């Protein structure tokens, strides 16, 4: 696992190590927060190389992810696999998504209800094709489960799930049999107060 130093958690993500801030969710729970848009291009590029290596044997034909923090991961994994197309499931109902396929979702880091949208014009990119679904962190499994349902409703053959990190263990129950498809570069725990103003790994 990693190491708590002050209000940060040091963890390996594939061949790299990073310190993540520990962020309270409520009085009794905190998470270590990875923001792929804040860690630098070179870090995500290397992580994409590492994750692509972990996924390569599943022979994906296209990479898919959900907006927003999974997008840099999808780009770098696509590039490292030698592919030239990736698909993003959107969360904002833009004009071209008025008749999109939709799926409700929930996330530990986002308040309120959301939904994923798949542009019908992009269904041909995944229907009947081998798809690797990637994301930054799989935590509760809610976002990934919604992504899988939406992709499969469009005819995708999901052959792998890739993540930079998995968090806790709740995602395994949420994904069920699909948990066996997960390839991850690292794991992070949940945290509880230590009684002295800091945090300890939650049992």
Image (spheres, rainbow, N blue to C red):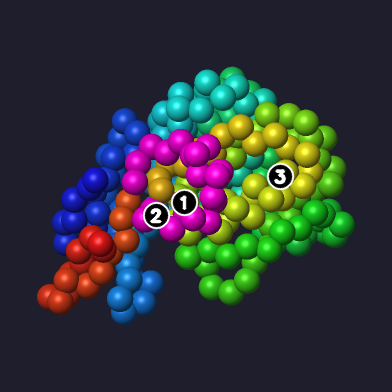
- Secondary structure, mark 3, is helix
Q: Where's residue 138, x and y in %?
A: 47, 51
Circle nearer the N terminus (2, 3): 3
**Residue placed at 65% from the left, 36% from the top?**
158
The segment highlighted magenta reads 167-187
**Residue placed at 46% from the left, 24% from the top?**
53
Q: Residues within 10 Å of mark 2 (few under 14, many from 20)?
A: some
Mark number displayed over residue 172 = 1
Residue highlighted by disc 2: 169
Q: Are marks 1 and 2 in contact (CB under 8 Å)?
A: yes
- Secondary structure, mark 2, is loop
Q: Nearer the viewer, residue 83 or 30?
A: 30
**Quarter of the figure with residue 129:** top right
Circle nearer the N terminus (3, 1): 3
Q: Residues within 10 Å of mark 1 (few under 14, many from 20)?
A: some
Q: Residues within 10 Å of mark 3 (few under 14, many from 20)?
A: many
Q: Where's residue 66, x and y in %?
A: 61, 49
């Amino acid at each position: 696992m990693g190491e708590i130093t002050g209000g940060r958690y040091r963890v390996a993500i594939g061949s790299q190590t990073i310190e993540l801030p520990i962020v309270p969710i409520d009085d009794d729970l905190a998470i270590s927060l990875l923001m792929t848009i804040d860690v630098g291009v070179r870090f995500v590029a290397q992580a994409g190389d590492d994750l692509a290596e972990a996924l390569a044997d599943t022979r994906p034909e296209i990479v898919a992810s959900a907006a927003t923090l999974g997008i840099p991961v999808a780009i770098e994994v696509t590039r490292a696999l030698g592919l030239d197309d990736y698909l993003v499931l959107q969360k904002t109902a833009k004009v071209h998504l008025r008749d999109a396929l939709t799926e409700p979702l929930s996330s530990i880091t986002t308040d309120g209800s959301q939904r994923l949208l798949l542009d019908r014009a992009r269904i041909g990119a995944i229907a009947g094709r081998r798809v690797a679904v990637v994301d930054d962190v799989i935590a509760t499994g809610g976002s990934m489960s919604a992504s899988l349902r939406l992709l499969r409703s469009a005819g995708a053959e999901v052959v792998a799930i890739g993540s930079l990190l998995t968090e806790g263990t709740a995602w395994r129950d949420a994904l069920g049999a699909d948990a066996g498809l997960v390839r991850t570069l690292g794991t992070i725990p949940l945290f509880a107060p230590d009684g002295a103003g800091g945090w300890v790994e939650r049992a």
